[in-house]
Image (cartoon, helix red, strand yellow):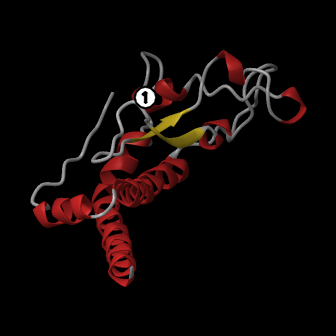
Amino acid sequence: MEIATRIDGLQELARACRELPDRIGRSALRQATSAGAKLVRDDAKTKAPIYTGPVSQGHPPPGTLRKQIYMKRDNGSSGPQKQVFIVAVRSGKKFQSVGKKGANQDAYYWRFVEFGTVKMTARPYLRPAFEAQKMNAVTAIANVLRERIDAEARNLNRK
């Protein structure tokens, strides 16, 4: 499931980014987008439920779901004018026997918690985190871009 937010009406920002050298513009955009994605990731971690019942042998310990929520930059989709960050949950065989004392760190069950099953009601945490933080993320992105572009423009004027 891919959720994207598009910000329209920022022609001035695009013009300012084009005037900056590619390296600086890409760096500023990456830093700004990262700031927005961090808000969503951190909110998802606080919203993710923690299992409080008894844990069967071989199953992940309580809190694994929260620990496995991460954010990363998608290199394939990112470019000089666009940066893409993904907020997701680590899962799969490579996490089955890693961590402290060989404890299972595989959060394979994240989709059951997020979407529910026939026997379990959904307890969403990723989608609500995105919905709650999307406007804050846009504001954070705009603030970081404003600061970085102003700073880089001043540096260019000095040279």
Residue 43 is situated, as x and y percent measured from the top left of the image, at 47, 54
Residue 30 is situated, as x and y percent measured from the top left of the image, at 41, 53
Vertical side of 101 occupied by 71: above or below = below
Vertical side of 89 occupied by 125: above or below = below
The residue at the point 56 percent across, 24 percent down is: 109
In the image, 8 versus 81, the foreground residue is 81
Q: Quadrant of the N terminus?
A: top left
In the image, 120 versus 126, the foreground residue is 126
The residue at the point 33 percent across, 67 percent down is: 145
Mark 1 surroundings: few (<14), some (14-19) or many (≥20) residues within 10 A: few
The residue at the point 47 percent across, 18 percent down is: 119
Q: Quadrant of residue 86?
A: top left
The residue at the point 70 percent across, 24 percent down is: 95
Residue 136 is situated, as x and y percent measured from the top left of the image, at 33, 64
Q: Identity of the amino acid at label 1?
A: Thr
In the image, 61 versus 157, the foreground residue is 157
| Residue, disc 1 | 121
Number of marks in picture: 1
